[in-house]
């Protein structure tokens, strides 16, 4: 059975061998065209160091299963990749590159530019505290600008996120200060009005009722004063935190390896050879599929073993075809006998002989 399968495969291949070689040739040509027309790809890279100690509470988190810890670099890279999915963050990156010119060419150009930048930039962790930011582009200058813009905008986003807490706290205490100041003025006025209505007697002591009333009003004034002073202190702390936010964030995230302008493309000769080999292998796979498919579809009895295996009948005899060379010789002899040009050559010779005799 194996011998029959091999024979049928060989017969299927040699019957249309040029047709089966066509996919290999076409895909090889297509691979060559792809390599020649492929656009260059430049990549720029930058490494950002993330301080784990100061971000332990915000960046280090426990995974849902409770067993795996996320490092500061992993959390920062994940956060940056999520920010790259937002149009506002990508738009801020584009503003700092030469791609900003495309943003004035219509809606389609804007959408295409945002999608292209989103696909060209990514972040990954290369340790517990180091985050690698990579940008690729057909233009080396654009790739360099993208990495710088991503680093700066990511740090600025962290600053803005931290500033929001400080701004909210400052606004909250500012409102409290205004309210507490009004309460303090009100209670102080009540005390002053009571003292005006009940002046201290010239002789003797105040009555017990006046002493208790004055003591109660003074307690209200002291409480309002303490609340007002505490709100002032908290507002001042929020203001200081707001002023220190940017410096703290820039100490938390700082650039170790600044990106450099790429000089060589990422595509090497080895990659080009692998690409061409993939096209050739794909063509070979198509050729093999064609040979196997042709052998399976063809139900013609071409070998004696076909009759034995498919019909289960004995083969009494078989007539072999004449060799190819014998057929060629026979055809050439038949063509020579039937060729009228030879008769013309004989007549011409007789005529020439008669002329010479005369």
Image: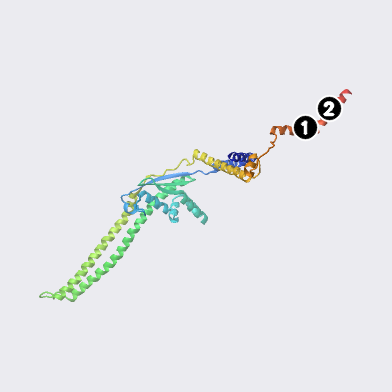
- Residue at (48%, 45%) from the top-left corner? 139
Location of the C terminus by quadrant is top right
- Residue at (77%, 32%) from the top-left corner? 336
Residue nearest the observer in this picture, 88 or 192? 88
The residue positioned farthest toward the top in the image shown: 357
- Residue 224: x and y in percent read 23, 67
Location of the N terminus by quadrant is top right
Residue count near mark 1 (Cα–Cα under 10 Å), binned few <14, some 14–19, many ≥20: few
- Residue 107: x and y in percent read 51, 56
Q: Circle 1 — which element?
A: helix
Q: Is residue 303 visible?
A: no
- Residue 344: x and y in percent read 83, 31
Number of dots carrying numbers: 2
Q: Quadrant of residue 161?
A: bottom left
Q: Give the label on residue 349, or none.
A: 2
Q: Compared with residue 16, is residue 179 higher up or lower down, i.e. above or below?
A: below
Q: Which residue is mark 1?
A: 336
């Amino acid at each position: 059975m194996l011998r029959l399968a091999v024979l049928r495969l060989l017969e299927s291949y040699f019957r249309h061998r040029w047709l089966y070689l066509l996919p290999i040739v076409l895909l090889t040509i297509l691979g060559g065209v792809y390599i020649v027309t492929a656009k260059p790809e430049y990549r720029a890279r930058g490494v950002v160091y993330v301080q784990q100690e100061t971000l332990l509470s915000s960046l280090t988190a426990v995974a849902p299963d409770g067993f795996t810890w996320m490092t500061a670099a992993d959390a920062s890279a994940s956060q940056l990749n999520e920010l790259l999915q937002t149009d506002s963050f990508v738009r801020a990156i584009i503003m700092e590159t030469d791609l900003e010119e495309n943003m004035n060419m219509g809606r389609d150009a804007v959408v295409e530019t945002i999608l292209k930048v989103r696909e060209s930039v990514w972040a990954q962790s290369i340790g517990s505290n180091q985050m690698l930011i990579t940008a690729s582009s057909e233009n080396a200058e654009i790739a360099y600008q993208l990495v710088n813009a991503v680093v700066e905008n990511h740090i600025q986003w962290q600053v803005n996120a931290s500033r929001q807490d400080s701004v909210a706290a400052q606004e909250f205490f500012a409102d409290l200060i205004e309210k507490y100041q009004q309460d303090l003025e009100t209670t102080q006025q009540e005390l002053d009005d009571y003292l005006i209505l009940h002046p201290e007697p010239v002789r003797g002591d105040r009555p017990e009722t006046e002493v208790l009333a004055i003591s109660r009003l003074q307690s209200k004034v002291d409480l309002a004063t303490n609340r007002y002073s505490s709100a002032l202190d908290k507002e001042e702390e929020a203001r200081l935190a707001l002023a220190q936010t940017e410096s703290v964030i820039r100490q938390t995230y700082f650039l170790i390896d600044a990106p450099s302008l790429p000089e060589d493309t990422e595509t090497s000769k080895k990659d080009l050879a692998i690409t061409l080999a993939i096209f050739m292998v794909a063509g070979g796979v198509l050729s093999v599929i064609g040979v196997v498919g042709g052998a399976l579809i063809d139900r013609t009895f071409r070998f004696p073993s076909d009759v034995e295996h498919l019909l289960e009948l004995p083969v009494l005899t078989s007539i072999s075809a004449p060799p190819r060379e014998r057929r060629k010789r026979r055809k050439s002899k038949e063509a020579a006998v039937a060729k009228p040009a030879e008769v013309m050559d004989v007549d011409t010779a007789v005529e020439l002989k008669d002329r010479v005799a005369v």
